[in-house]
Image: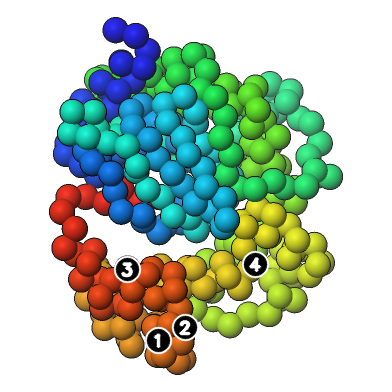
Amino acid sequence: MDRQAEFAALIEQYTNGDGMLDTALPRVSLAKLSKPSEPMHGVHQPALCIIAQGRKQVILGDSIYFYDASQYLVASVDVPVVGQVIEATPERPYLSFKLNLDPHLISELILETGLTDDVEREAPSTSLSLATVTPELLDAVIRMLRLLESPRDIAVLGPLAEREILYRLLNGPDAARLRQIAQVDSKLQRVTRAISWIKQHFTEPFSIELLASEARMSTSALHHHFKQVTAMSPLQYQKQLRLQEARRLILIQGSDAASAGHLVGYESPSQFSREYSRLFGAPPLRDANRLKALPGALVPA
């Protein structure tokens, strides 16, 4: 069995039906979908994503990232995106692997390997990037997934497999991006501080001056670098979080639109409904009913 076939077989072996599966491997999840999905709004965490079979698109701002088994996607910060599986059939389902990136592990590996280039003066790049899957990277991922066959080996060998995957990334085209994830005071980390603050306080109004103070940047630098990384302004980022949380409250918890809008920080029900419709393509109730009627599982971004 060749590498790609084994990679796909391992994912299919451990996914039970369509949807996302958290595995016994820390920070690793698998996905399977037997037909193309609806566009799904979500917040993409810092992660490595590799497709074993099928094809997907991820939309960030005005940019669309198409990728399949030949490329991997790296996300460097929490960023609102729209993800959609665009190629999948029952005979050849969409299959993918995701490893959430741990900045502390990356930092430790950088120090141990001497890959300590100074990234403080580097401007942070867009939070998503695509690169070619190398045989070495795919081998490391396959070795990690094989550990699911012997769970008692995971505690000892899992960290070694994860370190090899991160090592391959640090020696690839995303090396600078990963160094910025790990560098304590890089410009990317300052943007990340601003993102973390917005996520914790997204229901509250804020000023750009307050956010710049939290990020330890000037207001002009924060606005520039925040938009460079996330493809949106801090206020647009907050709006995305508010509307996604409102959608979750309506769909999962059964909240009515007025209550959901109020809970996420909207004072005007009409403004909430208008902005919800603009993002999701339909008013809250109609959107929720449409999603509930969809068969099968929805794979998030």
Is 225 placed left or right of 258 in the picture? Answer: right
Residue at (57, 56) in percent of width and height: 62
Quadrant housing the N terminus: top left
Mark 1 belongs to which amino acid?
His
Between the C-alphas of marks 4 and 3, the distance is: 23 Å
Residue 295: name its quadrant. Answer: bottom left
Residue underneath mark 4: 233
In percent of width and height, residue 162 lies at: 47, 26
Lower position in the chain sequence, tag 3 or tag 2: 3
SS assignment at label 2:
loop
Quadrant of residue 172 within the rendered picture: top right
Q: Amino acid at mark 2?
A: Gly
Distance, label 2 to label 1, CA atoms, is 5 Å
Nearer the viewer's eye, disc 4 or disc 2?
4
Which residue bears the numbered disc 1? Answer: 262
Task: Tell me residue 86's x, y (percent).
Answer: 35, 42
Sequence-wise first label, 4 or 2? 4
Whole-angstrom CA distance, mark 3 to mark 2, is 15 Å
Residue that appears at 41% across and 50% down: 83
Badge 3 density bin: few <14, some 14–19, many ≥20, Cα 10 Å: some
User: What's the amino acid at mark 4?
Assistant: Ser
Mark 2: few, some, or many residues within 10 Å (few <14, many ≥20)? some
List the residue tagged with mark 2. 265
- Which of discs 1 and 4 lies nearer the camera? The answer is 4
The residue to which callout 3 is attached is 248
Amino acid under disc 3: Arg
Residue at (39, 76) in percent of width and height? 277
